[in-house]
Amino acid sequence: MTLVRDLISQGLQMLLVLLLAPLLTGFIRKLKAQLLRRQGPPLLQPYRDLVRLMRKEVVLAEQASWLFRVIPYIIFAGTWVAASLVPTFGSGLLFSWSADLIAIIALLGSARFFLALAGMDVGTAFGGIGSSREVMIASLAEPAILITVFAVAMIAGSTQLSTIAEFMGSSAVGLRVSLGLALVALIIVAIAENGRIPVDNPATHLELTMVHEAMVLEYSGRHLALIDLSSQLKLLLYVSLIACMFMPWGAAEPRAGNLALAVGALTYIGKLMTCGILLAVFETSIAKMRVFRIPEFLGAALMLALLATLLRFVSGSL
Amino acid sequence: MMHAALWSVAVLLALAPAGIALSMLKHGSAILYGACLVVTSALVAIAILNLLDPAHPVLNATLPIGLPWLGAHFRIDPLAAFFLVVVNLGGAAASLFALGYGRHEDSPGRVLPFYPAYLAGMNIVVLSDDAFSFLVAWEFMSLTSWALVVSRHREAENVRAGYVYLLMASFGTLALLLAFGVLGGGGHYDFTAIRAAHPSAGVAGAVLLLALVGAGSKAGVVPLHAWLPLAHPAAPSHVSGLMSGVMTKVAVYGFVRIVFDLLGQPEWWWSMVVLAVGGITAVMGVLYALMQHDLKRLLAYHTVENIGIIYIGLGLALAFNAHGMPSAAALALTAGLLHVFNHSVFKSLLFFGSGAVLNATGERDMEHLGGLIHRMPQTAFAFLVGCVAISALPPLNGFVSEWLTFQAILLSPQLPSWGLKFLVPAVGALLALSAALAAACFVKAFGISFLGRARTEAAANASEADSASLSSMLFLALLCLIAGILPGIFIDSLAPVVSTLVGVSMPHQIGLDWLTVVPIAESRSSYNGLLVFLFVTFTGTLAAYAIHRLASDKLRRAPPWDCGYPDPDPAIQYTASSFAQPIRRVYGTTVFAAREIGEMPPPGSAAPARLHVELHDLIWEALYAPIAKVITFATERINILQFLTIRRYLTLVFVALVLLLLVLAI
């Protein structure tokens, strides 16, 4: 019986992230527009876009290979699996042991690897520019987040996300300098990984400034829908990750009752909204960086994360 | 078993002279490579049976050859058995690949005799159980591989590669010779005696450094890697695969054998040296690789990175072992050895892929390739699997060994030594950085060579590789997948190796639910490659089915969009160097003293603007060039001695005699 319950809980989580991801993006878009005194698209616009794209035919470049057509599914599957392994409303997930935090990050790394390949498949100049910048950003962001994970994992004594979430929710954590540093590093990486301002602009089509959009320039129809959905899932994943590690309040314990699950779900929505508001405000108040300023921005994250890890190595209580 | 193994090696040795005769025949190469395939497969079977035998038998044999009072000692213990698997699996795959690839050899007489001898040499290094046979086999392995490196001696570049390789190989053997000389100080050169005699701390430290230099120079540890990216690509591709995938592992074997087995309990500072060397090697190797546009040289530099990762694992194992944490040491050593196996698989695969490309197009330069996925779909698929595996991405095998290394690093706050407390996180950061850069490197390698549009006529007219080459590559690709999704089997078969070296092994993995890998405890960390693979496959297929069924499956081919400016000229595409430009700018300015000089034509002129990129190999310039300068200077001075008159020679001899007598008298 518990197994069935756990399975349902895991399945619910998978559906939940899939359904919520476009909403979060729509929410941020709407909010950003309103901060700029614009009306903004309706909250549900991302869903409509996805449905419309799915129904359209795919216009495929003549020289595109089979890999180009398979990659959207690989990216979507990798991101969805990764997103459904991050605790959202409750920490007990049936399959959370199948991939720990390092593996989740590596799964996202696989998705990015294929996306960068997709950018190079058609053999256009824009695809190449996007891919080469993406791997440069990733070469800094990935170590930064891995070291952040080191810091957190050493404090929690585990790389298992459910265990970390439970530990962070318990009173054993206390206030630690290293956790603060790790949070800042994680936020910087999350901004870079999701291609938000100041690293990349998700709304841009100004050719020379784009990274993510340049890689997916040749995609259309259902392929584009999958890639858009994947990036929305990725944003949701990072927000959930920050929420479950640094805002663990209200999350349901494993095997909790229905009430606790409902509370967990409500607080989760609240956390998503909080992070969405913060992101929208941050994005409207800052300008995009030049590409070669990004290494400094991400280098800061790397150094903060390393500092957090070193503090943990030096002292058990910092 | 022991006799079967020795007989197989003897057959390989006998195949070497047969190779001379076979190179005259029309199907000679097929016969030779077929024979090598059979013998190496037999050796793989012998080694696997030995490794999986629950009794873990240690087999010994002594042959009356070599030094008359010593004889030649041979031994198969779990460590040797594991490396026999690595050597002969690589050997079998290379032989299978060469069944097709070797047909295109211009001068088979320069390759066929040395190939089986080279395989035999690597096997004897692993089998030998005394310092004399070890060194002789080591040198034999170096010389036969040198012969293969210069098999295309008409290209000046290859001759230089062979020269540098020969110098570095002799230097490495010299260091090992000194190491064994110090170790067997009492005249006992068989390993059993060395093991029994516990060397003093100073002697052991000296041996560690000598082994690091001697075995490290063969493995390609920075800064002793200089020969590797020259020599590995120069050989025929199946031999490149062996040199990069297998011979560097034989060097790792030498290091492990001396440091973990012969030296006994490690000192605290050993691990610091090994860890620092490993971390620097990993990052420098991948940065060098990123700057290359020659596909085979890129792969060779990337071997340097992976050797760094392996040494990080070994260094961690030494650190834990020195501080009495055997189970953590077992985890770190397992990670290192698993990476030895994994790297030998995917690096062989990638070199074979580059060989297939070289065969099909005659090009090693990525700037002249492109679009090969259309012309060589199966090679492209196998190469892609290798790229994903080497970039340490789940669910393939490279990720498993790096994940285990990360888990070992996470255990290190418990280490009491302050030096290690600062060094280990830094090494962890270097490891993470090298993993991310490796992914960038292989997006470049695959993207530029196989994707996009063909940049030259040769690339546009390439044809798929032959079936023998393909089956070898696809077999290795399958192995990458199996080792990635069922790592528990591989970790368990490493258990006897690890427990003979550090006393304990990792917890038993087979039999855990769903074949999960749990290095320490489930609450701490676990990874299940099988489930991740199944989940990703399932969700991907589900998405594809649902969308095609419920939404739309229409598709239309059209010219590319490219923001409205599509250009039919393939030169518009990103090249290997332009792809690496952002990374060159971020890391290269310090590491390579990289400079970009843009030359703009004067206003009004229609001349093209030019961009010059200047890269410096700082290690070569700081370390090798001065040494070469000193040697050249000294030899030029001494050169006068060759042109003296007989009178002066006689005087010289007389003076030398008087001096020696004086020394004796005092």
Image (cartoon, helix red, strand yellow):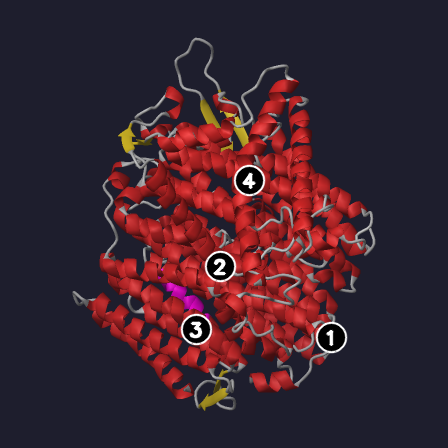
Residue B531's mark? 2
Instruction: State which region is magenta.
Output: B139-148
Q: Do the numbered discs 4 and 1 sit on residues whose CB atoms are within 8 Å?
A: no
Label 3 vs label 2: CA separation? 28 Å
Please tell me whether mark 3 sits on a helix, a strand or a loop. helix
Disc 1 to disc 2, how far (Cα)? 48 Å
Asked if badges 4 and 1 are on one and the same chain, I answer no
Q: Earlier in the sequence, mark 3 or mark 2?
A: 3
Label 4 crowd bin: few (<14), some (14–19), many (20+), radius 10 Å: many
Residue lying at 34% horizontally and 64% vertically, measured from the top left: B94
SS of the residue at dot 1? helix
Q: Quadrant of residue A27?
A: top right
Label 3: which residue? B85
Give the amino acid at mark 1. Ala
Q: Earlier in the sequence, mark 1 or mark 2?
A: 1
Q: CA distance from mark 2 to mark 4?
A: 21 Å
Instruction: Work out whether disc 1 and disc 2 sit on a shared chain.
Output: yes
| Mark 1 neighbour class, 10 Å CA radius: few under 14, some 14 to 19, many 20 or more | few
First along the sequence among labels 1 and 3 = 3
- Quadrant of the image occupied by residue B272: bottom right
Q: Rounded to the nearest whole Å, what is the CA distance between mark 1 and mark 3?
A: 34 Å
For the residues beneath circles 1 and 3, the answer to whether they share a chain is yes
Camera-nearest label, 4 or 1: 4
Label 3: chain? Answer: B
**Image location of residue B559, percent across then percent down:** 29, 27
Q: Residue at x 54, y 65 (%)?
A: B516
Q: Are marks 3 and 4 on the same chain?
A: no
